Image (tube, rainbow, N blue to C red):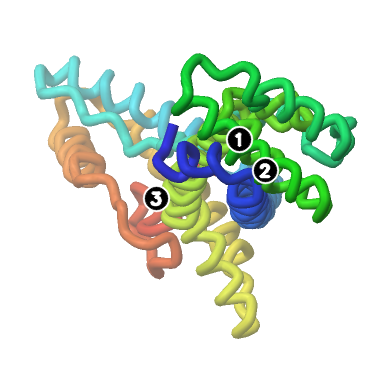
Amino acid sequence: MTPDASQALLNPQLWRLEVARRRRQLEELQGYLARMEAEFTALEQQVLAFQASYQQRLGAGWTEVESLQGELLRTLEGLARADGAPLPPVPPQRRQQALPQLPPAVPWPEAPPQEAELAAPSLKDLHRRAAMRLHPDRASNEIDRQRREGLMRDANLAYADQDRATLEALLIAAGESPQRLGGFDIHAHWRWLERCEQLAQGRLRLLRAHLVLLRQHPVTVFAEHVERARGRGLDALAIMELRLRAQAQELRRQLYIGERLQPRSPLSRDFLAQWQARWGEAPTTGPAHAKGLRGPGGLKGERAASSSS
């Protein structure tokens, strides 16, 4: 229980206002969370739509290129084994990077009933309860009697003035349960508010982290480059499609040559050394919109761009 809650128990009007204020703050935070959830979902849908478009246009091209690379690798391995040379390195492969998955939100705990939803006792009933608890005849000694007489005067004046808050405060100070004053359980409300605020703050941190991950994801960055190029009238995916076709054509030509080389010949050794050098290079991890071919061995920027597509 916070210090504010302890003080609120002594002042019904204060705890009504404090709970109402914290409820409004919680509703504002929940609204902000809903907007962030919608922002993450919208960005995720955009990225998924781009992935589908990328796969539709370039998936077959990548499959063909990687199949030809596999055939060429097997041919090179045969030449290397026949010559006793080191096996060629595996050609760079597309890396599969999953999009960040936002965990489902924890359901909000059920809120305690509001005061307005409950049947509150009448002023007459509150005054009767005050008389039962504070009547001087229930005093244990003279000092207690004088104290009770003062409290009963306050209760009678509050009843005459229709001052419900004062009657409730007198009853709570005398040990009356807040629930009996209309069912409004301040302890339950405070626990509920604290739990909801903890859930909201935790969800907020999680959403912010996942939004950063999604915005910085290679597919998101690549999609932004493609969209920016489209704004300049450039179809980046069409250019990549042409490059994939050119690479597949070059791989078919190289495969034709490799299959017809005599093992342990100077030409086969040169051919093997050429591809060991090409595939031995570190895979390109530059921006997805990088221009130019890396040579017959692969595309320079498109392989990194397609890592998650």
Q: Give the residue pinned by disc 3.
A: 304
SS assignment at label 1: helix
Using the numbered discs, state the Cα–Cα distance from disc 3 to disc 1 in whole angstroms: 86 Å
Q: Secondary structure at mark 3?
A: helix
> Is there any visible trace of residue 40 in the rendered image?
no
Considering only order in the chain, which callout, 1 or 3, is on the residue closer to the N terminus? 1
Circles 1, 2 touching at the beta carbon (< 8 Å): yes
Residue at point 17%, 44% (across, down): 277
Compared across the picture, whether 258 is left or right of 46 comes to left
Q: Is residue 94 left or right of residue 15?
A: left
Front residue of 231/116: it is: 116
Quick check: marks 3 and 2 in contact, CB under 8 Å? Answer: no
Q: Which mark is residue 149?
A: 1
Along the polypeptide, which appears first: circle 3 or circle 2?
2
Corner quadrant of residue 265: top left
Where's residue 22, x and y in %? 59, 50
Give the residue drawn at x 44%, y 28%. Answer: 143
User: As shown in the figure, which amino acid type bears the numbered disc 2?
Assistant: Arg
Answer yes or no: is residue 154 visible. Answer: yes
Q: Which amino acid type is shown beneath numbered disc 1?
A: Glu
* Residue 113 percent location from the top left of the image: 78, 31
Give the label on residue 153, or none.
2
Q: Give the distance between the C-alpha atoms of the residues marked 1 and 2, in whole angstroms.
A: 6 Å
